[in-house]
Amino acid sequence: MAIDSDVLVIGGGMAGIFAALSAARTGGDVRLLSYKQSTLAQASGLVDVIGYTPDGEGPVVDPFETIPELPDEHPYSTVGVDGVRDALGIFDDVADRYRGEHTASNALVPTHGGTVKPTARYPAAAAPGIASAERDTLLVGFDALVDFDAPHAAAHLEAAGVPFDVDGVTIRFPGDLNADAKVTRYAKVLDQNSDVAVDGRPRRVRDALADAVDPHLDGAERVGFPAVLGDDDPGAVRTALESALDVPVFEVPMGPPSLPGLRLEDDLYAALDAAGVSMETGNPVVGYDGDDRVAEVSIDRNGAKIPFTADQFVLATGGLVGKGLGSDRDGVREPIFDCHVPHDDDRYEWFETDAFGDHSFARFGLPTDEQLRPLDADGDAEFENLRAAGSVLGGFDFAAEKSGSGVSIATGHAAGVAAAEEAR
Amino acid sequence: MASTPHIAVIGGGSTGTGVARDLAMRGFEVTLVEQGNLTHGTTGRMHGLLHSGGRYAVSDQASATECIEENRVLRDIASHCVELTGGLFVKRPEDSEEYFQDKLAGCEACGIPAEVISGEEARAQEPHLATDVEKAISVPDGAVDPFRLVVANGASAAEHGARIETHSKVTDLLVEDGEIVGLEVEHDSGPGLRVHGTEGGTEEIRADHVVNATGAWAGRIGDMAGLDVEVRPSKGVMTIMNIRQVDTVINRCRPKGDADIVVPHETTAILGTTDEEVDDPEDYPEEQWEVDMMIETLSELIPMLEEARTIRSFWGVRPLYEPPDVGSEDPTDITRDFFLLDHEERDAMPGMTSIVGGKFTTYRMMAEDIADHVCDRFGIDAECRTADVPLPGSDDFSVLRDYMDEFGLQSPIGRRSVERLGSRAEEVLDTDGPNPTVCGCEAVTRAEVQDAIEQSGSDLNAVRIRTRASMGNCQGGFCAHRLASELQDSYDEPTVRAAWDELLQERWKGQRHALWGEQLSQGMLNYALHATTQNRDADPADTDDSIDFAAFDDGIGGDVEASPTESGVATDGGRNGD
């Protein structure tokens, strides 16, 4: 007999997590199926709501003033500005290590490329680095860590007009990490705070790192490092560096693999556990059964098809990056339920010639009704009991708007609540 | 005339750099000018086939014979640019048996080693070949990196005293008393290495003779002196796969046709090609059907191509030429032979020689012909040595030496570096600091990137063609910002940003033709990394409007204002700060 739930969520990224969490908090038996590692490891760990309008105006100061102005097809318009506020409330409730809830305004956070970007919630580890705080800044990079070049980022931030002085210095990370050490390796060394040899004598690595930075401080009122300051215990690493340097220390978010993204994922999965969500990970959903309603979906486990039934389903499998949307030379599709994905028949209409043009592919995804139920080509719900959330939705360009996490949280929450209420 | 004649060579492709090297080695004073990067024109847009001559063994035996001769020379003098893959001419059931036999006989007639193998033997060598491939002719085709080869020719020319100016466009030919006496060039960023943001300028370069080696652009140069050089540019598409589906060059054994070759190239395989005449070598349509046809037609030989991932497509323009009295209708009928146009003899306009037609594999031979011609003109008796003296990087050296251990590189990064650098490996990899990998897809380390920056200024596309950085699966998604940062030590921030933007746009240009399936997923990831994580699409440094920083969250209310001694203490209602 199939494993049954009230609400079954497919996809373990931000949208799936919030769908499952909100469904469980609303009440009922909730299960989450996830296949591969979520795209959180590829995200910076910043939780954006909206930073630029679809017309490219921005950076936006107050996302909640922009959301009501968005076009109808935008997922935020479906859940409404109050839906976004409610969802962020849930986020603030479970993401203890995040900051930004004290204000409706966006923060401008330095990026590893040397720009600033508008975001609504940021890790506590990034908080002392906020660009609107007028504190002279020293950025520190490590000579073998190619993803963050501190002198380059500092010069670029100055060109971006930040209201403080910023310098960058490149130092050798203490110890003998090999030239291609991964960011997780740096983090582990700092977590363990083991001894490294300095001038032939053993010294704790956190102290040795602070010693190496100290001569470059030159009056800086804060010091930024690439986001490698600990994995298991980042608070302790930062506190130790702050005590030794006597200035606030912050992390600059980076690209994949992103420790802040992985830390957030850990926290959110802990919240799912606490909420009593059942989880089944590591196997793909390969098909479904049903007609007007989805009756069951099945996963492939080592070649065996295992069915899962539920009253309500939430599709949160991601967009083009997460493979919730697939494509070939002839078209774009949603691979599990074959939900309708509007797109031009001519694939040369999917993109613009400028790398940062207004690409149609960036807005690919499912159209939905006001209940977040995917619609077919005639505008009818594909299934009575299937809702969609996150990047599988269409009608918005999360990269240009800086709205990816916010849309996932808001639509995940709304889909989860609606599914749980209907299942009752 | 000075005692050492000064020759101006126009064109930084294989022919131009080959001519510059040859003339410089024979003692001429040489200046080479190129409007873009080296290889900017046709050379950087070819499929990377080192011809055995087999392709022309039926239709054009003179070209075929030259190909096999030069194939042997390049394996010798350019060993670090060449991979001896071998090639197969495969026959499907519907392909003509008569043509197969003609091909075999033609190879024999031209001195091309050729052997017939069965379908089973062909599939044992290349398991992804279609099951109905009946048999094949095995020939010594190879793969060649055109970028590395041209850069090495340029470096050799410079070692022999030549001046190489890239990003320097010829704007006029200087004609005095019915004779061409030099050129006027517009430097994009001043003479010397290209540096973004450096003011350019015009320079008159006087020369005792001008060599027009601009290929498909030869007519444009001729026009500047009222000379009629009728090049017939013909475009061809090439589609790059993300892996090597084959390790041998696979040719379709049939008379002529589009989409009949797959060349393994570094980490990729390149599908080619089409042959369609165009009016303008710089402005022609790049169309979906061309890419689709490559994949569909070549899937008949290698079925897995139908579903395989492509990472980009690009188009090149052949500099085809035929004497005006031939008048071929179809560009595929135009000879691949080359022509030396002595404008004194032909047009009564002394001072310039044009070289047109020809093909990449025989570039050195073409250069030798031109250099002989120039020597004749000046009554200079100097032997050509380009067939005997190895290019920089191809000197004798032992690949067996353990460079990996010596330079602290992990295999396969070390192996790939040494393959690219050849005998220059030690000089380049011997650095003081750590040598991390900058481009993971192609295993390119900082030392190689810095070496390329020294050669080419702030131009990241020039770094790219020297190192292959950003030419792998992710197409720069993960490494474009790292490459930009490598410029930071040598250049100011606006220069670095301009170079970075230029690389991003160039990488996007070819990927647009591969946007479905895995590569669309990659394209979206790259877009997200650059726009979301780095905010490069709305980079405040690029806009005139300044941001009102004070209007945004300044962190007060978070724990930002906490002094270091307090930051370990809860200041925000009991949350820990980690």
Image: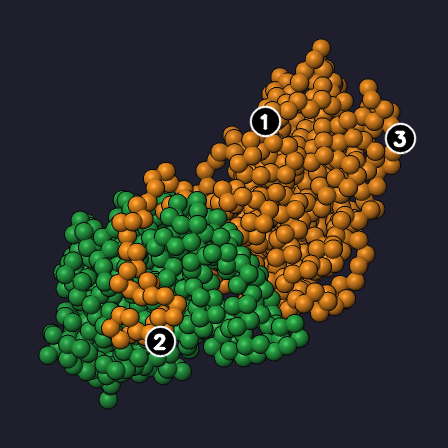
Verify CB contact (< 8 Å) between mark 3 and mark 1: no
Q: Chain of mark 2?
A: A
The residue under the point 74% across, 58% down is B426
Task: Reply above or below: B199 against B403.
Answer: above
User: Which mark, residue B50?
Assistant: none
Type of amino acid at the residue the image marks with label 3: Asp
Image coloring type: by chain
Height in image: B351 above or below B92? above
Amino acid type at mark 2: Asp
Q: Which of disc 1 and disc 3 is earlier in sequence?
A: 1
SS type, badge 2: helix
Q: Nearer the viewer, residue A238 or A118?
A: A238
B241 displayed left or right of B247? left
Name the chain letter of the residue that bears numbered label 1: B
- Tell me the distance, in whole angstroms, between the alpha carbons under discs 3 and 2: 77 Å
Task: Decide if residue A109 is in sight here.
Answer: yes
Judging depth in this view, the residue of B106 and B530 nearest the camera is B530
- The answer for which chain carries disc 3 is B
| Picture quadrant of residue B362 | top right
- A314 relative to A405, above or below: below
Q: Residue at x 22, y 53 (%)?
A: A62
Query: Residue A169: x percent and y percent?
Result: 53, 56
Image colour assigned to chain A: green
**Where in the figure is residue B351, as x and y percent of width and height?**
73, 20
Q: Which residue is mark 2?
A: A266
Mark 3 in CB contact with mark 2 (< 8 angstroms): no
Q: Which structural element holds mark 1? A: strand
Q: Are marks 2 and 1 in contact (CB under 8 Å)?
A: no
Which residue is under mark 3?
B381
In this figure, which residue is indicated by the disc labeled 1?
A: B201
Q: Residue furthest bottom?
A: A1
